[in-house]
Image (cartoon, rainbow, N blue to C red):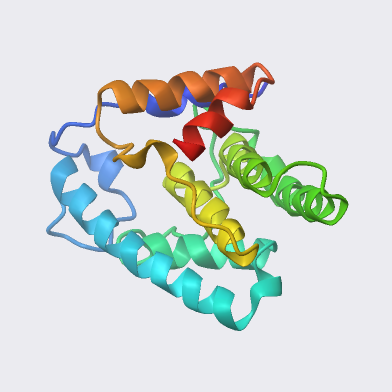
């Protein structure tokens, strides 16, 4: 049975020491606390986003492919984690069964290409649907939400649109913004994507 996306946000966001199992796969020995990890990941993600924009400018047709999605995740988190860009092999509290990920990922991009070609939805809604589908699959051990939002923003750029704003704040912080995002994901879990589309535009 697939797990609900809202569980993604149950972990604490404070700077507590990382447990030994949480440090497994880290490339940097100086990362010992949650705050250290946040700093390292954010730096890497900025570099990964820049790589994504450069790649998109050169090869825009590559965006909606499994290879690009996996490479983007690797560039976003590969300086921090050894497993960046590789699919998870174990169960998580959200997402599909790990064994289904390699078959599901191509279907996500097939659907998005169809929606674009058929103009099934407005472009920004297609980008939000791409985001939601990627988070629902939850292909990587970590970083899935940030990766999915960047994929959505790159799709908007490819279509000549401005990036989505995702509440115009830091979704890693606790508070009303995070609660609104969680509520929108819960609605999407129940097949109502409208709150997530509104949130992404806000």
* Spot occupied by residue 24 in the image (x, y as percentages of width and height): 31, 49
Q: Nearer the viewer, residue 134 or 157?
A: 157
Placement of 160 over or under 11, stated as above or below: below
Placement of 187 over or under 125, stated as above or below: above
In terms of image quadrants, where is residue 84? bottom left
Q: Residue at x 84, y 52 (%)?
A: 114
In terms of image quadrants, where is residue 177? top left
* Spot occupied by residue 157 in the image (x, y as percentages of width and height): 56, 63
The reply, left or right, for residue 92 in relation to residue 104 is left
Q: Nearer the viewer, residue 107 or 50?
A: 50
The reply, left or right, for residue 99 in relation to residue 167 is right
Q: Nearer the viewer, residue 95 or 121?
A: 121
| Residue 169 visible to an observer of this rendering | yes
Q: Residue at x 56, y 21 (%)?
A: 4
| Residue 10 visible to an observer of this rendering | no
Q: Is the N terminus in the top left, top right, bottom left or bottom right quadrant?
A: top right
Q: Residue at x 80, y 53 (%)?
A: 110
* Spot occupied by residue 34 in the image (x, y as percentages of width and height): 18, 41
Q: Residue at x 12, y 58 (%)?
A: 30
* Spot occupied by residue 94 in the image (x, y as percentages of width and height): 53, 28
């Amino acid at each position: 049975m697939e797990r609900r996306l809202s569980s993604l946000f149950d972990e604490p966001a404070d700077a507590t020491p990382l447990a030994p199992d949480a440090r497994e796969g880290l490339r940097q020995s100086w990362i010992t606390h949650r705050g250290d990890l946040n700093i390292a990941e954010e730096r890497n993600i900025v570099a990964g986003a820049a790589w994504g924009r450069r790649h998109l400018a050169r090869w825009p047709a590559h965006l909606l492919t499994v290879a690009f999605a996996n490479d983007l995740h690797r560039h976003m988190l590969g300086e921090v984690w050894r497993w960046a860009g590789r699919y998870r092999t174990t169960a998580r509290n959200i997402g599909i069964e790990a064994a289904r990920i390699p078959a599901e990922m191509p279907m996500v991009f097939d659907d998005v290409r169809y929606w674009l070609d058929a103009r099934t939805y407005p472009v920004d809604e297609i980008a939000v649907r791409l985001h939601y589908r990627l988070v629902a699959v939850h292909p990587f051990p970590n970083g899935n939400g940030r990766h999915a939002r960047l994929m959505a923003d790159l799709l908007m750029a490819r279509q000549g649109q401005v990036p989505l704003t995702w509440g115009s704040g830091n979704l890693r912080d606790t508070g009303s913004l995070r609660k609104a995002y969680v509520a929108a994901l819960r609605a999407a879990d129940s097949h109502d994507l409208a709150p997530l589309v509104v949130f992404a535009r806000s």
